Image: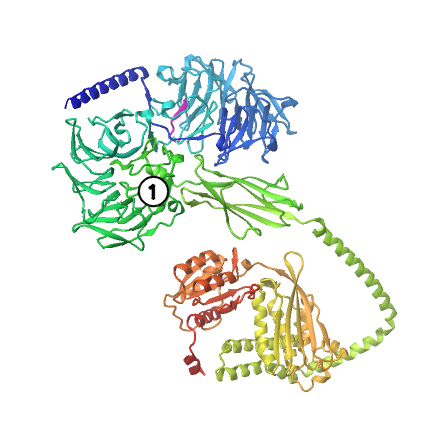
């Protein structure tokens, strides 16, 4: 008791002394307030690339880049670190003494070597008016004049720099400041057409050519004015060596805002004054910095975490946060939004580990730590030693405030103490038999202590402790407890997970597998989720309940999976806080955010159980060196936008601009450097990038530079995204395009030379041909007579048109009859209704052809080219011709070049006429033989392709003399009299090919078959030029998808949407995917009944996707709906379940889908037959 009374006297004396000290300080400081908390500061030093730590000036440009001038050069902050600028950028390394940016966005740098200006290419050029170097004074001595020039204080004179008509810089005194003898000029500021500057011991304003001086009569005390600020509220602030003054908007006199106690007085060549995001004014003091909140100055010194060497320069960034340069300690970033305050030994804490926190009353926060207990009094900004009378050892691992206001301490050695603030009495309630890990006060008022030897209940009334469920919970370590919304208690122990409900304590089995070593932390959030962690990294989640088992799953998050947690707690808003060794992860509205020292936390490492959710919504977090008080959680968790920046790009060692074209250089490398904007605090950032044609997919890196060596000629697109690691967010990509032009022998000029040589040969051949024509001029009369006879024969044949037309019309009718016959006998190998419909259309087209020819319309024909799918067209023509060919027992072979482009521009109707005429002739005159249809592609220049079409047969053939006559209408070979036909087909072919700019080449021999071919040039088109909508194509029938899922993998957004709309319209549930990776994720989660895929996919192809799906679930059918014919990779053996080439009609597509979704059974096939 005596010890207790002595403790009370010492406590009372101490409080009296502290109150007296506060009173003395208040009298001395007047309207100044000394802040007691630690500032959330981020330090950038040599490990961040800032090799010179003595900062002179700082500036943030309009792009958000922070520029730092030091005694040894210039640095730029790119969101991740500082980069020195030197000879490569044209900068003369020297002490930087002033910085500013002109109205055109050019950075101006004044150094001891002179004045330099940064161009749009990133290079610095000297600014030398009249060819002479210009040296600016140190400090705020550069100010943009708003017209592309710059105001410069040089030799205490105010000069104006401007460019003349020749682009040369000129310098002259700023009028009328020079004429009126304004005196020695110090700092200068130009805003909205008004220039302020220090002139002698007064301030001067130049507006509309009128100079006004502000002296003592206008409230400006005599001083050397070194810092000027135009604040957002329209005020002008000025900082002198001894004073701080303000000119309010519309006022004619300044008001003085000096700091009592002489803290305003600083002897320096420059003193900055800036404005933070809340509109508060910040400037330097003799011992640190001060912030004006509109009513008083808040003073910060080394006790708040500032360096003891002094602040040399200050700047506020675009977010209103404060950057401070120092003398030899680098750059400090202050997240000045007051979202966090920190407490350390500078505020009276012992500096040892803090294990537990509790709110006593509105004026006190109690701590338990390795040094015992401590009490924080927020109004005083100080921490005091606990008032308990306790013999050592005093290590405390838990502190709890009960409903009556009593403070309970659970000491590490097992003692349980109760302190009553009203009576200042300390009572020992009991002693636990094992070392204490922590304690919990449940809503029923029961105390629970978890120890190294199990779980115990503390009976406050009986002053005794007793084990909880000793027959169930063994005497092994229990580390944490939590209480859910229904009053159930959950205990995490090394022997497992335990729960106490209305039926008592029970062991809860964790499914699917118990964690080895048991559990260390447990928490329950208001949504009923149960959170667990163990001694190993990782976090698990399940749901609370009264069952004997609880099923948990690991949280799918890379950062959490690699973290061992020290506490799991929820705050008053239901957020989950998970503290570990790399910061604190917070789950808010389903999204995880990691908070660290970069966000203002005192330390990244946390302590076991050291978390307290205060009644006012704030939270307290214990750290190895002190305590963090999070005042504004919403602000810390607010989304931030970190954007990737392409800082520099070079090819072969030379800088290149975006969208530039560079000449190919052997072994030259493309080097790209990048950074991140919006990352002033230096949060961890990773990058994802890809270069088209080189990288198959996105590449993840933490580096800030990428190098591509020996790029071949071509067009390249580099894309870059920034990944905010702690926010788990990714930015939109930025792009950089570059064209590497080919060497001279592959250039158009080289091709032009080759073309000229070919043209010369053509001219020589033409002259030779002319001589031959002259030599055979005598034969002209005979040729005319011959042609006249042929004309008579043609007129006679035209009169016989009606007699011969019927024969050519039989071909499609024969194919139709053949299709009907096979359909009736149950042949299911082909879609005969579609075949019949196509041959009916062919019949109608043939009638139109005959009518056109008879009227002479083909002579004045105008082609109607349009973009279309080439592969689908060729296969469609082949399918139409197949029945004609097979009717006479022939074998039909198709050989299509894989180099054919997907989409070309052509008159597909006329091209179909030509091909079907040639194929029809081959089928007509060939029996029990072979007809070959071949298409070859010869790529020409970019965007053009030459297609060569060939039809060969083993039919009756003809002699060379008959070939030319067959190109006349109604002319037939002598060996074709027994075959039906009018002889009109080749005449139509010849005329159509003439309009296409092509010529029909024919080779034949009697009895050896014939070969007809022609070549034509076509423009290569893009699939984006085609309409994405389906044509109806006939009656689809009664289709009901019954909600079955079909995965649509199509990289083109519009075509993907059309496919999905069509499937959804027939009752299916379409699942869109743009690439193979997202498609496989969907198949893994829930296999669909069908996968529809394109052959060409971003970063992959349809064959790889098919292979992956077959491995995941071989039963899922895969339909290839593609613009290109299937091209199986070398060595591949897999087949798609069906192939449909674009463009299909809606009826064709849905028929194919239904065949795969509802395959016809054998019984159904038999019934159909």
Residue 126 higher or lower than 1098, as above or below: above
How is the structure coloured here?
rainbow
Q: Is residue 1074 visible?
A: no
Q: Nearer the viewer, residue 659 or 182?
A: 659
- Is there any visible trace of residue 11 in the rendered image? yes
Residue furthest out toward the left = 462
| Quadrant (top left/top right/bottom left/bottom right) for the C terminus | bottom left
Between 1000 and 422, the one lying in front of the other is 422
List the single residue furthest toward the bottom.
978
Q: Which residues are magenta?
A: 277-283
Measured as percent of width and height from the top left, residue 91 is found at 59, 29
Q: Is 946 drawn above or below residue 878 in the view shown? A: above
Total numbered badges shown on the rendered structure: 1
Q: Quadrant of the N terminus?
A: top left
Residue 92 within the magenta-colored segment of the rendering: no
Q: Residues within 10 Å of mark 1 (few under 14, many from 20)?
A: many
Position of 912 with respect to 822 (left or right) is: right
Q: Is residue 304 left or right of residue 507?
A: right
> Measured from the top left, where is residue 898 in percent x and y?
61, 65
Residue 701 location (% of width, % of height)? 50, 44
Q: Quadrant of residue 162?
A: top right
The picture quadrant where one finds residue 957 is: bottom right
- Give the residue at mark 1: 565
Q: Quadrant of residue 274?
A: top left
Q: Position of residue 939 (x, y in %)?
A: 66, 60
For label 1, the SS is: strand
């Amino acid at each position: 008791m005596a010890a207790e009374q002595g403790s009370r006297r010492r406590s009372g004396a101490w409080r009296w002394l502290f109150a007296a000290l506060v009173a003395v300080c208040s009298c001395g400081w007047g309207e100044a307030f000394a802040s007691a908390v630690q500032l959330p500061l981020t330090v950038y030093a040599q490990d961040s690339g800032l090799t010179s730590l003595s900062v002179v000036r700082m500036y943030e440009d309009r792009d958000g880049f922070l520029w730092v001038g030091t005694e040894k050069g210039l640095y730029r902050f790119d969101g991740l670190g500082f980069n020195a600028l030197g000879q490569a950028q044209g900068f003369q390394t020297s002490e930087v003494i002033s910085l500013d940016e002109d109205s055109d966005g050019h950075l101006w740098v004044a150094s001891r070597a002179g004045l330099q200006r940064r161009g749009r290419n990133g290079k610095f050029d000297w600014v030398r008016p009249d060819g002479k170097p210009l040296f600016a004074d140190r400090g705020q001595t550069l100010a943009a004049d708003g017209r592309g020039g710059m105001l410069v204080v040089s030799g205490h004179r105010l000069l104006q720099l401007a460019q003349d008509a020749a682009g040369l810089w000129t310098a002259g005194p700023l009028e009328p400041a020079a004429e009126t003898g304004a005196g020695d000029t110090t700092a200068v500021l130009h805003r909205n057409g008004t220039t302020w500057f220090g002139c002698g011991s007064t301030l001067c304003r130049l507006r509309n050519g009128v100079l006004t001086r502000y002296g003592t009569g206008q409230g400006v005390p005599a001083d050397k004015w070194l810092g000027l600020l135009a604040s957002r509220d329209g005020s002008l602030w000025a900082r002198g060596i001894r004073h701080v003054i303000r000119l309010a908007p519309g006022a004619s006199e300044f008001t003085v805002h000096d700091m009592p106690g002489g803290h305003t007085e600083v002897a320096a060549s420059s003193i900055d004054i800036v404005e933070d995001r809340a509109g508060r004014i910040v400037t330097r003091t003799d011992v640190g910095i001060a912030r004006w909140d509109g009513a008083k100055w808040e003073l910060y010194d080394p006790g708040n975490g500032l360096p003891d060497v002094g602040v040399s320069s200050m700047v506020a960034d675009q977010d209103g946060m404060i950057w401070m340069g120092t003398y030899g300690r680098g750059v400090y970033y202050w997240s000045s939004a007051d979202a966090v305050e920190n407490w350390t030994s500078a505020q009276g804490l012992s500096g040892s580990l803090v294990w537990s926190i509790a709110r006593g009353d509105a004026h006190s926060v109690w701590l338990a730590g390795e040094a015992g207990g401590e009490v924080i009094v927020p109004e005083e900004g100080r921490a005091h030693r606990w008032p308990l009378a306790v013999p050592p050892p005093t290590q405390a691992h838990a502190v709890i405030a009960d409903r009556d206001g009593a403070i309970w301490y659970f000491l590490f050695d097992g003692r349980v103490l109760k302190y009553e603030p009203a009576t200042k009495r300390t009572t020992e309630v009991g002693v636990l038999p094992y070392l204490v890990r922590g304690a919990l006060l449940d809503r029923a008022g029961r105390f629970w202590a978890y120890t190294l030897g199990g779980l115990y209940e503390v009976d406050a009334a009986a002053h005794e402790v007793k084990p909880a469920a000793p027959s169930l919970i063994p005497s092994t370590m229990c580390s944490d407890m939590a209480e859910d919304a229904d009053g159930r208690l959950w205990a995490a122990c090394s022997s497992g997970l335990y729960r106490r409900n209305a039926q008592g304590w029970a062991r809860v089995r964790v499914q699917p597998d118990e964690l080895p070593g048991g559990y260390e932390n447990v928490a329950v959030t208001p949504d009923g989720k149960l959170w667990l962690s163990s001694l190993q990294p990782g976090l698990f989640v399940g749901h609370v309940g009264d069952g004997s088992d609880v099923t948990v799953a690991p949280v799918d998050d890379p950062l959490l999976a690699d973290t061992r947690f020290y506490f799991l707690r929820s705050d008053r808003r239901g957020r989950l806080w998970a503290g570990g060794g790399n910061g604190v992860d917070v789950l808010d509205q389903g999204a995880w955010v990691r908070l660290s020292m970069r966000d203002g936390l005192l330390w990244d490492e946390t302590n076991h159980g050291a978390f307290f959710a205060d009644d006012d919504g704030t939270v307290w977090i214990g750290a190895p060196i002190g305590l963090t008080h999070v005042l504004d959680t919403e602000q810390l968790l607010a989304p931030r936008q970190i954007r990737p920046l392409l800082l520099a790009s070079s090819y072969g060692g030379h800088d290149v601009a975006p969208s530039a074209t560079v000449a190919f250089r052997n072994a030259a490398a493309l080097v790209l450097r990048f950074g991140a904007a919006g990352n002033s605090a230096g949060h961890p950032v990773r990058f994802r990038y890809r270069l088209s044609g080189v990288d198959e997919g996105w590449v993840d890196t933490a580096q800030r530079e990428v190098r591509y060596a020996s790029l071949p000629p071509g067009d390249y697109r580099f894309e870059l995204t920034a990944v905010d690691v702690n926010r788990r967010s990714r930015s939109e990509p930025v792009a950089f395009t570059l064209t590497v032009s080919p060497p001279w022998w592959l250039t158009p000029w080289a091709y032009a030379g080759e073309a000229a040589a070919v043209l010369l040969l053509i001219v020589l051949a033409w002259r030779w041909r002319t001589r031959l024509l002259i030599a055979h001029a005598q034969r002209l009369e005979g040729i005319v007579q011959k042609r006249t006879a042929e004309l008579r024969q043609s007129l006679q044949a035209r009169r016989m048109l009606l007699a011969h037309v019927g024969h050519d019309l039989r071909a499609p009718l024969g194919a139709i009859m053949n299709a009907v016959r096979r359909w009736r006998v149950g042949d299911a190998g082909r879609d005969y209704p579609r075949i019949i419909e196509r041959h009916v259309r062919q019949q109608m087209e043939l009638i139109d052809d005959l009518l056109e020819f008879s009227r002479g319309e083909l002579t004045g024909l105008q082609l109607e080219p349009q973009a279309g799918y080439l592969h689908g067209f060729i296969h469609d023509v082949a399918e139409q011709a197949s029945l004609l060919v097979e009717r006479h027992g022939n074998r039909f072979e198709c050989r299509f070049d894989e180099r054919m482009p997907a989409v070309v521009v052509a008159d597909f109707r006329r091209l179909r006429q030509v091909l079907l005429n040639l194929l029809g002739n081959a089928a007509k005159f060939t029996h029990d033989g072979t007809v070959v249809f071949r298409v070859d592609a010869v790529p020409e220049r970019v965007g053009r392709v030459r297609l060569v079409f060939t039809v060969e047969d083993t039919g009756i053939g003809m002699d060379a003399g008959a070939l030319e006559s067959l190109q006349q209408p109604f002319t037939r070979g002598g060996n074709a009299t027994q075959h039906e036909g009018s002889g009109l087909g080749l005449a139509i072919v010849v005329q159509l090919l003439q309009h296409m700019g092509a010529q029909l080449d024919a080779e034949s021999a009697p009895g050896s078959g014939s070969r007809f071919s022609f070549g034509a040039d076509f423009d290569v088109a893009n699939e984006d030029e085609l309409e994405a909508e389906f044509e109806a194509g006939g009656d689809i029938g009664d289709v009901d998808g019954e909600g079955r899922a079909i995965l649509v993998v199509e990289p083109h957004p519009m075509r993907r949407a059309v496919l999905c709309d069509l499937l959804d319209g027939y009752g299916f549930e379409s699942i869109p995917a743009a690439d193979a990776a997202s498609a496989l994720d969907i198949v893994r989660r829930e296999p669909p009944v069908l996968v529809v895929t394109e052959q060409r996919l971003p970063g992959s192809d349809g064959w790889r996707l098919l292979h992956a799906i077959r491995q995941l679930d071989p039963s899922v059918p895969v339909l290839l709906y593609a613009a290109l014919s299937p091209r199986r990779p070398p060595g591949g053996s897999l087949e798609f379940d069906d192939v449909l080439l674009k463009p299909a009609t809606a009826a064709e597509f849905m028929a194919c889908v239904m065949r795969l979704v509802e395959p016809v059974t054998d019984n159904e096939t038999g019934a159909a037959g």
